Image (cartoon, rainbow, N blue to C red):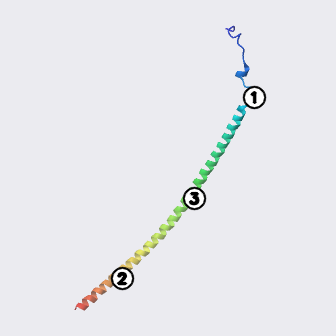
């Protein structure tokens, strides 16, 4: 079996990479890939930071809006109650004026 491979020469240049060939195109490709990975990593960090800050801002604005809406609701409820009191007093005054008018009209007919 060993006799079959005795005539074959083993070529190191095909099967192994030499460490002296680092100045070729593979070295520049590696630098490019490293720079791309670094840029994408930084972009991911900035995007994550932006998302977190937007989430915090949204949470604070929702809390502020809820407090403001609560204040507006209380203010509108108070105004509504005041208008209802004024409406009832105006209705009572109208009823008194109508009854007074009816009495005067009856008194003139007699």
Residue appearing at x 43%, y 72% in the figure = 80
For the residues bearing labels 2 and 1, Cβ distance under 8 angstroms:
no
Q: Position of residue 60 (x, y in %)?
A: 57, 58
Residue appearing at x 23%, y 90% in the figure = 109
Give the mark nearest the N terminus, 2 or 1.
Answer: 1
Toward the left, the furthest residue is: 110
Residue appearing at x 59%, y 55% in the figure = 56
Give the mark nearest the N terminus, 3 or 2.
Answer: 3
Instruction: Give the spatial CA distance, label 3 vs label 2.
Output: 50 Å
Image quadrant where residue 6 sits: top right
Q: Which residue is mark 3?
A: 60
Residue appearing at x 51%, y 67% in the figure = 71
Where disc 2 sits, the SS reads helix
Q: Is residue 62 above or below residue 16?
A: below
Foreground mark, 3 or 1, reads 1
Where disc 3 sits, the SS reads helix
Image quadrant where residue 9 sits: top right
Q: Residues within 10 Å of mark 1 (few under 14, many from 20)?
A: few
Instruction: Give the spatial CA distance, label 2 vs label 1.
Output: 105 Å
Q: Position of residue 61 (x, y in %)?
A: 56, 59
Q: Which residue is mark 2?
A: 93
Q: Which residue is mark 1?
A: 21
Q: Position of residue 72 (x, y in %)?
A: 49, 67
């Amino acid at each position: 079996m060993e006799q079959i491979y005795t005539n074959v020469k083993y070529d190191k240049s095909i099967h192994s990479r030499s460490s002296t060939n680092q100045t070729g195109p593979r070295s520049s490709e590696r630098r490019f890939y490293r720079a791309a990975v670094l840029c994408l990593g930084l972009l991911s960090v900035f995007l994550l930071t932006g998302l977190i800050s937007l989430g915090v801002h949204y949470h604070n604005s929702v809390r502020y809006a809820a407090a403001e809406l609560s204040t507006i609701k209380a203010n509108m409820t108070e105004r509504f109650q005041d208008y209802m009191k004024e409406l009832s007093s105006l209705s009572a005054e109208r009823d008194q004026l109508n009854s007074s008018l009816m009495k005067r009209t009856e008194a003139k007919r007699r």
